[in-house]
Structure formats: structure tokens, C-alpha cells
Amino acid sequence: MSEHDRAQRVVVPDEVLVQRLPDDDSVFLNLATEEYYGLDPTGTSMWVALTETGNVELALDRLDAEFDADREVLRRDLDAFVRQLAGWGLLRLCEDPG
């Protein structure tokens, strides 16, 4: 993912339903594909950072403060995570109009 991609807005499609579980796992249903997905607590933290900030770079900043990890490793992991979620249809990257 390029620096330009990380500056894009993160949007959850209307056809995606999300439920956080008490153990900080999350489950997802993509109504368009009728497929279920699950995230462990780390994936859920990444999801929350992405969706609450609405921006990959801002999510990286939040996760960098939350986790004791090398920022470049975290960046690669987040980029791979975003690609995977986009591939599943659970989020979209959109041009930021501002």
C-alpha cells in the first residue's frame, strides 16, 4: 500500500454487519456475499482504529500508541490487514475529498 493509499478514507459498506463480542473478538457478515468472518482481539483493535479514525494513517498512529511494536512492522501488518478486509468486501478505501 502506498503512502497515498494510507491517506484515503476508510468506509464500511452498508452491506456489512459487525458485532463485537464480550471477549473483544468480532464477527462480520457481508450481506452481499453471505459470508461470515471473524477477528481476534488484535484484529478487532485494528478494525476499531480504522473505522473510528476513518483513515489508514490515523489508524496507524493510534495503533502505534496502543501496541509495543516497531512502527514499520505495524505499518506492514496494517497494510496487509486493510488489503485483506477490502478483498473480503468488509471495507473500501475512498478518495478523501479534502
Image (spheres, rainbow, N blue to C red):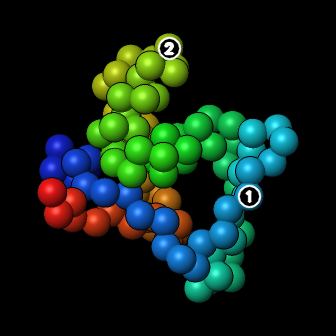
53 or 90, nearer to the observer: 53
Left-right relation of 26 to 84: right
Q: Residue at x 58, y 37 (%)?
A: 45
Image quadrant in which the C terminus is located: bottom left
60 or 86, nearer to the observer: 60
Left-right relation of 50 to 17: left
Q: Residue at x 40, y 38 (%)?
A: 59
Left-right relation of 28 to 87: right
Local crowd size for mark 2, using a 10 Å CA cut-off: few (<14), some (14–19), many (≥20): few
1 or 2: tag closer to the N-terminus: 1
Camera-nearest label, 1 or 2: 1
Query: Vertically, is 88 above or below 71?
Result: below
Q: Which residue is mark 2?
A: 68
Q: Which residue is mark 1?
A: 19
SS at mark 1? strand
SS at mark 2? loop
Query: Vertically, is 83 above or below 72?
Result: below
Residue 49 in view here = yes
